[in-house]
């Protein structure tokens, strides 16, 4: 059996701010930008993984009003999902992203579980961690 991740979804409340982070700070490609009646789906992804789409969707879109409100509140707290990315040089990547003004959650450190990583918060509050790839 061969199963792969095709898309993953993140809730965002401002697509233009999300673009500034995912496209401009992280360097992701914009693959799709779909406007709907009261929502927008913006698909981005790393050039090195054309098969992977990260869909930045309007928070709460297509959900019952009570659920949408709960999601908006959780997003505002930074309590929803996020991403874990990998890079060959976490320190250089951190400095490059920090220089864009992105919100730093954690500077690069060596974790007790053997990974060197750092973390940012996207403009909507989603956590984006970046791990150092193991040396081959």
Image (cartoon, grey):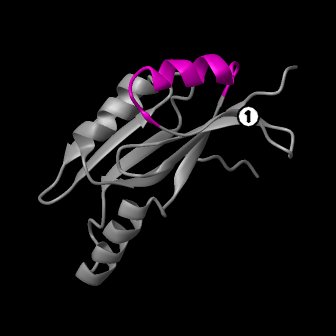
**Residue at the far left in the pictured view:** 37
Asked if 83 appears above or below 59 in the picture, the reply is above
Asked if 56 appears above or below 102 in the picture, the reply is below
Q: Viewed as shown, does residue 64 lie left or right of 21?
A: left
Q: Residue at x 35, y 50 (%)?
A: 124
Rendering coords of residue 38 (x, y %): 14, 60
Q: Residue at x 44, y 22 (%)?
A: 27
Residue 4 visible to an observer of this rendering: yes
Quarter of the view holding residue 19: top left
Look at the image and tell me in which quarter the C terminus lies: top right
Foreground pick, 69 / 7: 69
Rendering coords of residue 73 (x, y %): 34, 70
Q: Residue at x 70, y 35 (%)?
A: 117
Rendering coords of residue 40 (x, y %): 23, 50
Quarter of the view holding residue 75: bottom left
Residue 28 visible to an observer of this rendering: no
Q: Is residue 81 magenta?
A: no
Foreground pick, 29 / 68: 68
Label 1: how many residues lie within 10 Å, few (<14), some (14-19) or many (20+)?
A: some
Q: Secondary structure at mark 1?
A: strand
Q: Is residue 102 magenta?
A: yes
Q: Residue at x 43, y 53 (%)?
A: 10
Rendering coords of residue 65 (x, y %): 23, 80
Q: Viewed as shown, does residue 95 lie left or right of 77?
A: right
Q: Which residues are magenta?
A: 87-103
Q: Which residue is mark 1?
A: 109
């Amino acid at each position: 059996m061969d199963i792969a991740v095709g898309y993953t979804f993140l809730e965002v409340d401002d697509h233009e701010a999300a673009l500034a982070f995912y496209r401009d700070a992280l360097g992701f490609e914009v693959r799709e930008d779909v406007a709907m009646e009261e929502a927008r789906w913006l698909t981005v992804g790393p050039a090195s993984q054309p098969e992977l789409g990260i869909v930045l969707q309007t928070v709460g879109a297509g959900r019952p009003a009570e659920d949408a409100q709960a999601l908006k509140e959780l997003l505002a707290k930074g309590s929803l999902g996020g991403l874990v990315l990998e890079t060959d040089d976490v320190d250089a990547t951190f400095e490059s992203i920090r220089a864009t003004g992105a919100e730093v959650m954690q500077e690069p450190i060596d974790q007790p579980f053997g990974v060197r990583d750092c973390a940012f918060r996207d403009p909507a509050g989603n956590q984006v961690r970046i791990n150092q790839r193991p040396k081959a």
